[in-house]
């Protein structure tokens, strides 16, 4: 058992499951959105705004936004624990890794709040 | 075989050092990197790794500290193997003769027990290169599943509890180098998939 407190859910199984579920959510959301764009080649602003004002679209977009944040956190955390280690960077690795992880989490929080503001500002 | 080339070289220069023992792919001593791919020197024909007129480049197993020439320090590899408690745990009173297993239950261990711990798989695994102290590696996980799948073992919960952290099992990214290089044709990635399923069943 390896102890870790900076991963998304403190459990490898939980992170693994979240990573996969969020991947499915993101795939469905973006494929659907791409399909919508293909089916509406002469899309105008009113139609686009109407789409994003609908409650179901807000739910889907918020879900995709949250999924993106969780997915990115797990992914970036994994990258940081693979490459920003003492084997690769020496003694300062912990400081660099922790700074990187904190920066990622803060950035994701900013994107989440900003995203909600955009979605509900329509 | 590549081992014969090494034997020839050693006759010319006795200082060349490598491990070998059974010379027939059973002991797992002569795992090394042959033209970029890990394998056992004793069962790898030169013709299978060298194109006509090509070079034969032999390196020690990647990712482990080199002791000398082709000999690597396998301490961390064995440490990971030790972590998974590679022995049968059964707290019920021992029967008079032996713990019997049905042929079906015994069949579940096929493709698992054959591992000879040559370390070809783990040392060809990028996840093991980056986190050799934390990620158990394909060899250790294949053995972990060997005991999880054993009908005579009673410590499934304890074994699984030791594996659910973000590193031990879940650092596997499904690269499948382990499957590609295993000289015994085993499939650690499939075993890791089974462990994940068992963890999921236990926790959902």
Image (spheres, coloured by chain):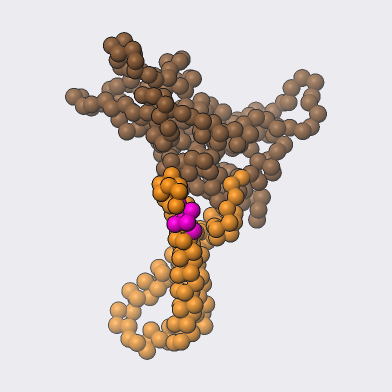
In the drawing, does residue B83 fall left or right of residue B32? Answer: right
In the drawing, does residue A26 fall left or right of residue B5? Answer: right
Question: Which region is colored magenta?
Answer: A93-98
> For residue B39, what is the image quadrant?
top left
**Measuring 44% from the left and 87% from the top, which residue is drawn there?**
A122
Q: Which chain is brown?
A: B
Taking the view exactly as shown, the residue that stands out farthest to the bottom is A46
> On screen, B16 above or below A110?
above
Number of numbered discs present?
0
The percent position of residue B56, horizontal first and vertical second, equals 26, 25
The kind of secondary structure the magenta stretch mainly shows is helix
**Measuring 55% from the left and 36% from the top, which residue is drawn there?**
B80
The percent position of residue B123, horizontal first and vertical second, equals 43, 35
Q: Is residue B176 visible?
A: no
Q: Which chain is orange?
A: A
Task: State the quadrant of the N terminus of chain B.
Answer: top left
Q: Is residue A96 magenta?
A: yes
**Measuring 63% from the left and 38% from the top, which residue is drawn there?**
B148
Query: In terms of depth relative to the viewer, which is nearer, B170 or A10?
Result: A10
The percent position of residue B153, horizontal first and vertical second, equals 69, 34
Q: Is residue B159 visible?
A: yes
């Amino acid at each position: 058992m390896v102890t870790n407190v900076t991963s998304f859910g403190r459990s490898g199984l939980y992170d693994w499951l979240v990573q996969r579920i969020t991947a499915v959510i993101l795939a469905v959301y973006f494929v659907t959105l791409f399909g919508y764009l293909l089916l509406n080649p002469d899309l105008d602003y009113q139609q686009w705004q109407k789409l994003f004002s609908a409650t179901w679209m807000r739910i889907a977009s918020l879900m995709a936004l949250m999924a993106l944040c969780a997915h990115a956190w797990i992914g970036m955390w994994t990258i940081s624990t693979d490459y920003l280690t003492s084997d690769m960077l020496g003694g300062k690795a912990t400081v660099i890794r922790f700074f990187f992880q904190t920066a990622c989490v803060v950035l994701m929080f900013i994107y989440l709040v900003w995203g909600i503001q955009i979605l509900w500002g329509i | 075989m590549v081992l014969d080339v090494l034997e020839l070289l050693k006759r010319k220069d006795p200082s060349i050092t490598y491990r070998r023992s059974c010379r027939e792919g059973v002991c797992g001593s002569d795992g090394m990197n042959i033209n970029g791919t890990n394998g056992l020197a004793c069962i790898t024909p030169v013709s299978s790794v060298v194109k006509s007129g090509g070079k034969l480049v032999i390196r020690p197993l990647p990712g482990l500290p080199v002791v000398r020439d082709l000999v690597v320090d396998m301490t961390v590899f064995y440490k990971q193997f030790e972590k998974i408690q590679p022995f049968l745990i059964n707290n019920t009173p021992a029967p008079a003769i032996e713990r019997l297993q049905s042929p079906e239950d015994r069949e579940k261990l096929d493709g698992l027990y054959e591992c000879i711990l040559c370390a070809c798989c783990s040392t060809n695994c990028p996840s093991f290169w980056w986190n050799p102290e934390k990620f158990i590696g394909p060899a250790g996980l294949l053995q972990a599943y060997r005991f999880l799948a054993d009908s005579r073992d009673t410590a499934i919960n304890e074994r699984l509890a030791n594996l659910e952290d973000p590193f031990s099992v879940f650092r596997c990214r499904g690269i499948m180098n382990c499957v590609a290089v295993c000289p015994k044709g085993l499939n650690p990635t499939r075993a890791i998939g089974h462990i994940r399923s068992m963890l999921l069943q236990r926790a959902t």
